[in-house]
Amino acid sequence: MKRRRGVRQKSVGDDSLRSDYNLRSNSCKRVKRDLKSGDHSLASGGNQLMNSQNCEDLSQRNVSTISQTSVTHKTTKMPNKSYNLRRRVTRSGSRGGRHVTEPLSLVTIDDLPDDCLLDIFERLDTIEDKCALQRVNKRFYSLVNRLLVAQKSFTVGSTFGPNNEQMLTQRICRTIISKCPNLQTFKMPGFYTKTSINSFDERIGDKEMYVLGKKCKDLKELDICGCGNVTEKGINFIAEICPKLEKLSISFCLQVSGASLQKLTKNFRTLSINTNDMTP
Amino acid sequence: MNGEYSLDTTEGMAASGDPPTNNAVDDYDAEEALERQREEENKIKIKLKSFEGGVYECGLTAAKMSVMVANMLDALQETDLTKIATREPIPLQNDAVTNKALEKIVEWVDHHWDDPPIDPDFDDEKERRNEELSHWDKQFIDIADQGELFDIIAAANFMDIKGLVEVGAKHICNKIKGKSCTEVREMLKIHNDFTPEEEAAIHKENEWIYAKD
């Protein structure tokens, strides 16, 4: 019974597969065009040509085989056609047999779809790398921005571990706060193993707490172990202005006294404060 | 199709007179049967056709690592798997799937086809993210020609092969790490399309990075 059904459906399956192919290829083309025609795509054909010529110069191979005809061919076609045709033109050239041995590589990272790039950028965990990427070009800027705005947690600064040497200064802290307004978890243990930022003024203080409280209202978890400049004022401000705050780690915050902690515990039911010792 | 088949085998084993054992053993048996089935299936070769027209052979289980190809094969509703091998090659209609890219992709899936599937309940997403690439993957993805590299990643993305996209992403990420924007631009051959005013504005936004030096 089962087998018979399978046989009957085979012929139907054939057709459906073929239509599936067509559907897929069409939709994929459409998606690609949509992706490429966004505002971040290179606007003018002139740019593209320049870009591709740069690539040609840089690649340092096949230079002699670059046919002038293909380049001029491109200039005439470029301006009124969509972005991804650039690839199409080079490919057809290679398929036509003009550069059979090695087609000229004009594919750059810009040819990757957005979700691929986001996948790559997500893996960079320092704010420095992300900021550097933002400055590369417009598309990168908007993509990285999208990531930062969506970012829910951030960890900077150094604990006692020797491998974690990201430095935490007021500037880094403020940049993170200004770029990621939707933070829910912010860990910035401020122990300094490096001597390079020993100046006391560079460290996180009450001012950063004010900025943080005003910007990131959704904060649930805050870790400011070892940030010796933070006083009760800053802590109280954060506790008051962030209603969702559940977890607060203030070990080694030497200027926070027991009396202020008592005040905090009155305000919150689920606030866990992780003070190991040393608080007077 | 897959599930039906494995169900049949377990039913057959139960019907052959085995006394009912505890669940753990059953699970183990089922797992082993599935593994054997995967291995069997991988001996069946199917053909994939690149955008440029090149045809490459690939094991069935390996090809199914691509969610897109797996869906296409499901659409066939073929019960006799060996017949799939005699079919005409499956066309991959995206201009990123060049001959070279497809060749590399087939190489990758042929090496990784027996990887354990990712279990969302047990595998920590974050841990997997930070995991270093294996030696084989590193050698595989270390490609001098950037166009080829991006073709492979775009093609893997099109064919929906998660593992390979991840390998590529990790590789590029490692290259970008710790570089300044001009270095990134040079390395990836990206054209700077900011106007001077825009650039100055962003520079101001990120001033602290340069103040450090």
Image (tube, rainbow, N blue to C red):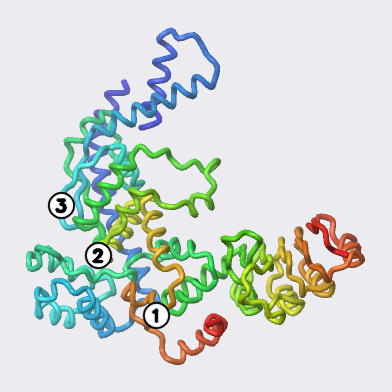
Mark number, residue B145? 2
| Label whose residue precedes the other's in the sequence (3 or 1) | 3
Q: Which mark is residue B210?
A: none
Q: Quadrant of the N terminus of chain B?
A: top left
In the picture of the structure, the residue carrying the numbered disc 3 is B54
Residue B148 vs B74, above or below: the answer is below
Amino acid, disc 2:
Asp
Question: Mark 2 vs mark 1: same chain?
Answer: yes
Frontmost of labels 3 and 1 is 1
Residue drawn where x is 37% and y is 82% of the image: B192
Query: In the image, what residue type sits under mark 3?
Result: Gly
Circle 3 packing at 10 Å, graded few (<14), some (14-19), many (20+), is some
Question: Distance between the Cα atoms at labels 3 and 1?
Answer: 38 Å
In the image, taking residue A192 as reference, residue A264 lies left or right, namely right
Residue A201: x and y in percent read 71, 82
Q: Give the spatial CA distance, label 2 vs label 3.
A: 20 Å
Secondary element type, mark 3: loop
Residues beneath discs 3 and 1 located on the same chain: yes
Q: Residue at x 25, y 47 (%)?
A: B106
The residue that appears at 39% across and 80% down in the rendered structure is B182
Identify the subunit bearing mark 2.
Answer: B
The chain to which mark 1 is attached is B
The residue nearer to you, when weighing A216 against A44, is: A216
* Pick the front one: B193 or B76: B193
Tag 1 residue:
B182
At label 1, the amino acid type is Thr
Q: Chain of mark 3?
A: B
**Is any atom of residue A273 visible in this view?**
no
Quadrant location of residue A60?
Answer: bottom left
